[in-house]
Amino acid sequence: MLQTYHRYEGKYRYRQLQLFLWQDQGIWMNHKKVLRLMQMLGIQSRIRRKRRPNSSYAPAQRVAENRLKRDFSAIQPNKKWGTTLPYIVWRSRWIYLSAI
């Protein structure tokens, strides 16, 4: 079990380790037993950092020019539109919401 744990650099938890034991070494054991053995050996998976959104733009490049200058009244319909683009994590994916 330690060979399999070190082969995958300690990245995986007990359920995935159970599958790797079966695939790599042909050893089948219950996931609860794998968990107990990991606890007895004092090994646990490394916690990987979550990815954060980042951008490589300078702050001045990210801000759009203020053309409205807080004058929201329009002479005709559809002349002035405004929106915001917040991002939301949904089902482990980033989605963008644009409300006009």
Image: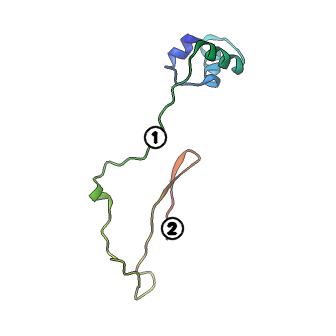
Amino acid type at mark 1: Arg
Q: Is residue 1 above or below residue 35?
A: above
Say which residue appears at 29% left-offset and 55% top-offset.
59
Kind of residue indicated by mark 2: Ala
The relative height of residue 89 versus residue 80 in the rendered view (above or below) is above
Q: Is residue 32 left or right of residue 96?
A: right
Number of residues whose C-alpha sits closer than 10 Å to that of mark 1, classed few (under 14), some (14–19) or many (20 or more): few
Residue named by callout 1: 51
Residue where numbered disc 2 is placed: 99
Q: Residue at x 51, y 26 (%)?
A: 46
Label 1 near label 2: C-beta < 8 Å? no
| 58 relative position to 95: left or right | left
Residue 65, given in percent of the width and then of the height, sits at 30, 68
Q: CA distance from mark 2 to mark 1?
A: 26 Å
Q: Which is more toward the observer, 91 or 36? A: 36
Instruction: Give SS at disc 2.
Output: loop
Q: Earlier in the sequence, mark 2 or mark 1?
A: 1
What x and y, as percent, mark residue 9?
A: 49, 19
Placement of 54 over or under 40, stated as above or below? below
44 and 25: which is toward the camera: 44
Residue at 61% across, 16% down: 38
| Residue name at image x 55 percent, y 16 percent | 5
Q: Residue furthest bottom?
A: 75
- Where, by quadrant of the figure, is residue 85 drawn? bottom left
Quadrant including the N terminus? top right
Snapshot colouring: rainbow
